[in-house]
Image (cartoon, helix red, strand yellow):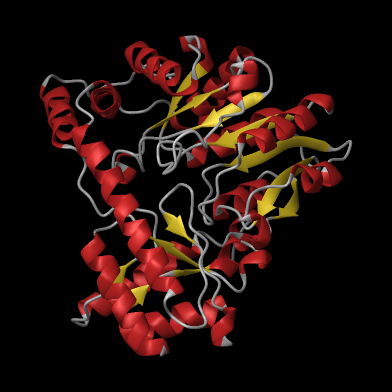
Amino acid sequence: MSKFSKIAENLTGQKMFQILAQAKNLEKQGKDVIHLEIGDPDFNTPQNVKDAACNAIQNNHTHYTISQGLEEFRQQSAKKIKKSRGFLPSVEQILVTPGANIQIYLTLLAVADPGDEIIITDPCFVSYISLINLCNLVPVRVTLHEENHFRLSPDDLKKAVTKKTKLIIINSPNNPTGSVINKDEMRSIYEIAEKNDIYILSDEVYGRMVYEKGNFLSPSSFDHSNKRVIVAHSLSKSYAMTGWRIGALMGPKELVKRMALILETITSCVSPFIQIAAIEAMHGSQSEADEMIKTMKSSRDLLVSGLNSIEGISCINPGGSFYAFPNVSGLKITGVEFSSHLLRESFVATCPGFYFGDAGKDNVRFCFATSPIKIQDAIERMRVLFN
């Protein structure tokens, strides 16, 4: 019998999708499940975006396009960056991709060779470690401490850097913790990378979801992504377009050129009608997207207050993203036990913090990208179960 490759044997996938499968199975049995386990906004894609995609298909925008992406898409993306980050990149600095996950993969392939070290945080988004392993690179974890509101400490980062370090991956606002790195910390992180001539991959997928104004700073503001900062971004979260698989990476021109060749090799290009829909998302009315984020903030406030009202659970108020990361150790159970018990007995689906790293073993990730009504229902079910 033929054997599988080592890569195929060792892949673990994304655990939250496996929890989603369990929750969907319970729904097939007639159970009323509240989905707080997966980072998928419980909102519809804005109507103007859907209309743009349908019109593009009717107008036969259904063929190949250039691998780097439609120029109009990259121009519109550059304008959004000018508005949100304060500088205007060139279209040559932008690469259109099918979502943001592949941007991490492209970055690793373009900047590091097998055996090189990649710094990530613990906890962190699950794909980081999987992709690092896939590329035969060495993950170096820096622990995020709850007492520092899960923000990356520049002092801890500095200790992790070696001569083999090629890339630092940061994620602010953070998945799974919701933390936002403050401006002084971000400047120090950039200075560490500059001193050691290391790339930074800044995962800013949740960059629009910062609930206290003035807290967010992209490291790209220091070099305008001309030298060492690569920014990963997608439209998945901010426009409820997770299933569309559309994003845009920004980075140094020569590096992006090489990533475009890798993308061309792997997947040719992103469908043009999806790119046209994304142009409408960025350029058209923002009313539905703004209302969605406003609802998320209300849901965040309700969830954090409710979690902190249950004895044995403590939750830091997340500054961004749509995740809360409460500590459940006061209930004398682990995060894995909490999530399993909550789904089995009360039909509320969540994701154990341990799935994002060892430092999250006492925590559970809640996605609050849903209505306040569902959040309130989930809190009441937890109150009955754990009181």
Left or right, residue 124 beside residue 44: right
Res. 368 in view: no
Q: Which residue is drawn at 59% across and 13% down?
A: 253
Res 213 quadrant in image: top left
Q: Quadrant of residue 49?
A: top left
* Residue located 40% across and 81% down the image: 342
Question: Relative to residue 272, is residue 135 drawn left or right?
Answer: right
Instruction: Look at the image and tell me whether residue 46 can be seen.
Output: yes
Q: Give how far across and how far down residue 366 sits, in percent.
A: 42, 64
- Give the residue displayed 16% in from the left and 20% down from the top: 60
**Going by the picture, which residue comes out furthest to the right?**
163
Left or right: 113 as drawn, with respect to 6: right
Residue that appears at 79% across and 32% down = 192
- Give the vertical position of 242 relative to 166 (above or below): below
Where residue 181 appears, as percent x and y from the top left, is 60, 42
| Image quarter hosting the N terminus | bottom right
Query: In the image shown, does 42 or 252 lie closer to the viewer?
Result: 42
In the rendered view, would you say 146 is above or below 229?
A: below
In the image, 217: left or right of 100? right
Q: How many tags in the picture?
A: 0
Residue 160 in picture, x, y percent from top left: 82, 46
Residue 208: which quarter of the image? top left
Q: In the rendering, at what x and y percent does residue 369 appear?
A: 32, 54
Question: Vertically, is 152 above or below 364?
Answer: above
Q: Which image quarter is the C terminus in?
A: bottom left
